[in-house]
Amino acid sequence: MPELPEVEVVRAGLEPAITGATIESVEVFDERSLRRHTGPSEDFIDRMTGAVFGTPQRRGKFLWIPLTDQMQDSTDDIPAIAGDSALGSPTSPAFGRSAGEALVVHLGMSGQVLLREPGSVDNLTRIRFDITHPVIGRRRINFVDQRIFGSMAIDELVPVTDAGANFGETVPTQVSHIARDPLDPHFDEKLFRTRLAKKNTGIKRALLDQGLISGIGNIYADEALWRAKLHYETPTATLSPARVKLLIAEVRAVMLQALAEGGTSFDEQYKNVNGTSGYFERSLQAYGQQGKPCPRCGRLIVREQFMNRGSHFCPFCQRMPKVAL
């Protein structure tokens, strides 16, 4: 499943091309991709047709695009087509955010949001948008999903109520229970440490808890734990503030590296908006490396069963701590 770096790559790729664009037409080819939308495909099509996309936003693995009924103000608020895009944090300006609704995009296991030229056809397209941007003209968005675990839905935007909320900050109701991610400038590291210390679980389970910290999945949990030299079953209550601080620093470092390398692609299921794969797979130190030498000590990386998936680690570098009885 795409994690924070992959979703952010998609968000950043969409931002300059769709912000301020009007949706001219919508086609739904498979209603299973609307499973999280409260209404039939006709409702989705009617409400999306004629709407204007705002600035794509993200929290953790969750992506949404605010909607308005018509263009507001001028094109001055539309991002430049060239240049770097900032992370999709709540502090990013959202063109048209005041509308109160957003298109929520779940990539699932294999969802791809592909930005195409008009008339382009992609196999396994489930939902299609033809849009017109005030600067770059007509474009097509194909939502491609091989395994149909992803979805799109129109959802209500509600105010953010946590301690780090900015004035006017909103999230879709489907995202309101999700914690801030470690790349969010308002992520409260002290609060995270406090909540983590109260958990009676292993550290990897805690990292995968999207209500505690969002954006981390199996790949980046294994990579960050390897970098921090922590066994995945290390009890959270035994971690000192210094070890937690180091772990969060490693989580951020591995995610920023993955972002710079376009994310991690396996089996051609994750692609960015241009249809190309990320190459962070080449930089993996632990995940998927079972049977290979640990880059740090030379012992073999192993894989153990964990929560219907696998954990990859070095038994020498990441020893399970002895806990006094």
Image (cartoon, rainbow, N blue to C red):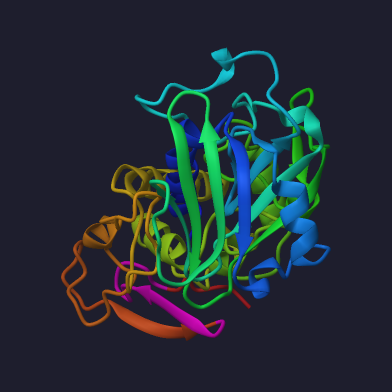
Q: Position of residue 89 (x, y in %)?
A: 58, 34
Name the residue located 37 percent from the left edge and 68 percent from the top edge.
318
Quadrant of res 161: top right
266 or 232, nearer to the observer: 266
Q: Quadrant of residue 92?
A: top right
Q: Position of residue 35 (x, y in %)?
A: 72, 70
Left or right of 247 on screen, residue 201? right
Q: Is residue 86 magenta?
A: no
Q: State the extent of the magenta-drawn residues as a range.
A: 307-319
Residue closer to the observer: 118 or 245: 118
Question: Is residue 191 found left or right of 267 in the rendered image?
Answer: right
- Eyeballing the image, is 107 above or below 184? below
Residue ID at (72%, 28%): 70
Question: Is 317 covered by the magenta stretch?
Answer: yes
Q: How many numbered callouts?
A: 0
Which secondary structure class fits the magenta region best? loop
Q: Is residue 206 left or right of residue 277?
A: right
**Is 155 rendered above or below residue 209?**
above
